[in-house]
């Protein structure tokens, strides 16, 4: 393995952002903590060929190379990392990589582009309904029974409008935020308990039993409010779309690197042709049922964004009229240093309590 001079070591120690020094074989000589946080290094080598190629090309050209690189986000490789890589050739066939993570910046830009179009379209229905009901109320002033009826409907539409605005704000927040920038150790047992508590009243009202089982004492690394909101959304859907006197089961399965949280219901299920679309924003399988339950079509989109922002994903299995199982998959946290696989090259100024996402 190559080495770097004390002078260069001093310079590297004060550089901000993600910094990697590698040799011509893509073996890492030095790396900043940010490289481990983004999982750009695996077993002491650069984890992505696209980044290693930038270093190799700079060596061949004998001058800096700047390149935009998009790679799938580890460990499940479902989300994406948008990176700007600047490779600078050094003496001794070494390369210096300065990497900027543009993922959040690009995500925010995409949210801004989509926000106005999506919201303006979805707000038309409840706003139009409120307007029509207000006119009906005005025309029925001499009929107390009609006034009560239209007033109740007006309250329902106002509630639906409020829920839609709340869900849109939640979706915008999770799409525009990188939860790993303020993540910490979270107990999966506590997340499950909090989500179950949130839906208990609605489940009791329908006579639905919520059963919790599986493995215990698992931990993940992330934003508590986002992960709790995602689990709440899945559980709330399971209760809302299940018939009375049925059961919703929550089971935690702990693997070597992934924690699976299964939510299984005995509800109406989802037709197979719809399974690929249920995570789209504002998509509803059953429009009539969604209006009856107050659904906005944003809950599952929020769930998917939260999971992928944490390096995980969400899966679904369903059979129409039999039930559905949603599985939230998250990287397991084991409390160790973020140096990937314990084989990372010596790092620069890595805090002793820096933690790992596995």
Image (cartoon, helix red, strand yellow):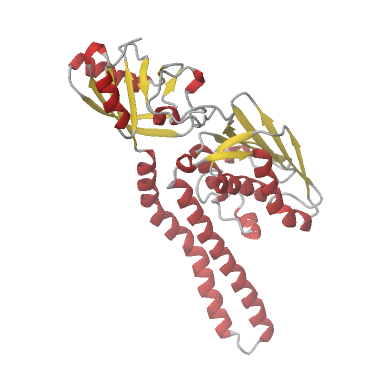
Residue in the picture at 54% in, 64% down: 162
The single residue placed furthest to the bottom in the displayed view is 142
> In the depicted view, which residue is nearer to us: 332 or 128?
332
- Where is residue 90 shown, x and y percent of the image? 23, 17
Q: Quadrant of residue 303?
A: top right
For the C terminus, the image quarter is: top right
Residue 291 drawn above or below residue 320:
below
Whether residue 59 sits left or right of residue 263 in the image: it is left
**In this rendering, is residue 216 above or below 232?**
above
Visible in this render: residue 319? no
Vertical arrangement, residue 80 with respect to residue 139, above or below:
above
Q: Give the camera-side residue of 145 and 206.
A: 206
Q: Quadrant of residue 136?
A: bottom right
Number of callouts = 0
Residue at left offset 37%, top offset 17%? 28
Q: Is residue 153 visible?
A: yes
Residue 128, position as x, y percentages in the image: 50, 69
Quadrant showing the N terminus: top left
Residue plotted at (46% across, 51% down): 173
Q: Position of residue 230 (x, y in %)?
A: 59, 46
Residue 179 lies left or right of residue 117; in this view the side is right
Residue drawn at 78 percent across, 50 percent down: 208
Work out whether residue 179 or residue 290 is closer to the camera in this orientation and state it: 179
Q: Quadrant of residue 334?
A: top right
Residue 59: x %, y % from top left? 23, 15
């Amino acid at each position: 393995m190559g080495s770097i001079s004390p002078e260069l070591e001093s310079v590297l120690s004060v550089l901000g952002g993600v910094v990697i020094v590698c040799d011509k074989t893509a073996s890492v000589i030095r790396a900043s903590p940010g490289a481990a946080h983004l999982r750009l290094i695996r077993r002491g080598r650069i984890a992505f060929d696209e980044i290693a190629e930038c270093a190799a090309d700079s060596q061949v050209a004998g001058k800096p190379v700047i390149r935009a690189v998009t790679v799938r986000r580890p460990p499940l490789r479902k989300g994406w990392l948008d990176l700007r890589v600047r490779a600078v050739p050094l003496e001794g066939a070494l390369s210096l990589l300065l990497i900027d993570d543009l993922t959040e910046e690009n995500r925010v830009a995409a949210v801004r582009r989509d926000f106005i179009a999506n919201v303006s379209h979805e707000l038309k229905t409840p706003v139009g309904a409120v307007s029509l009901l207000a006119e009906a109320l005005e025309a029925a002033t001499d009929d107390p029974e009609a006034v009560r009826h239209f007033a109740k409907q007006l309250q329902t539409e106002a509630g639906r409008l409020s829920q839609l605005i709340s869900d849109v704000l939640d979706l915008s927040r999770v799409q525009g935020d990188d939860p790993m920038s303020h993540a910490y150790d979270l107990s999966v047992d506590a997340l499950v308990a909090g989500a179950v508590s949130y839906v208990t009243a609605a489940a009791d009202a329908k006579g639905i039993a919520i059963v919790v089982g599986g493995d215990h004492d698992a931990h993940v690394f992330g934003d508590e409010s986002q992960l709790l909101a995602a689990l709440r959304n899945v559980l709330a859907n399971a209760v809302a779309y299940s018939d009375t006197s049925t059961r919703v089961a929550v089971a935690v399965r702990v693997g070597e690197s992934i924690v699976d949280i299964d939510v299984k219901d005995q509800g109406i299920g989802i037709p197979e042709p719809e399974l690929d679309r249920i995570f789209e924003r504002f998509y509803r399988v059953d429009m009539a049922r969604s209006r009856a339950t107050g659904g906005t079509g944003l809950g599952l989109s929020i769930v998917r964004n939260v999971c992928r922002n944490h390096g995980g994903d969400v899966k679904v299995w369903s059979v129409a009229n039999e039930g559905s199982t949603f599985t939230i998959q998250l990287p397991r946290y084991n409390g160790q240093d973020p140096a990937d696989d314990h084989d990372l090259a010596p790092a620069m100024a890595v805090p002793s309590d820096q933690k790992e996402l596995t």
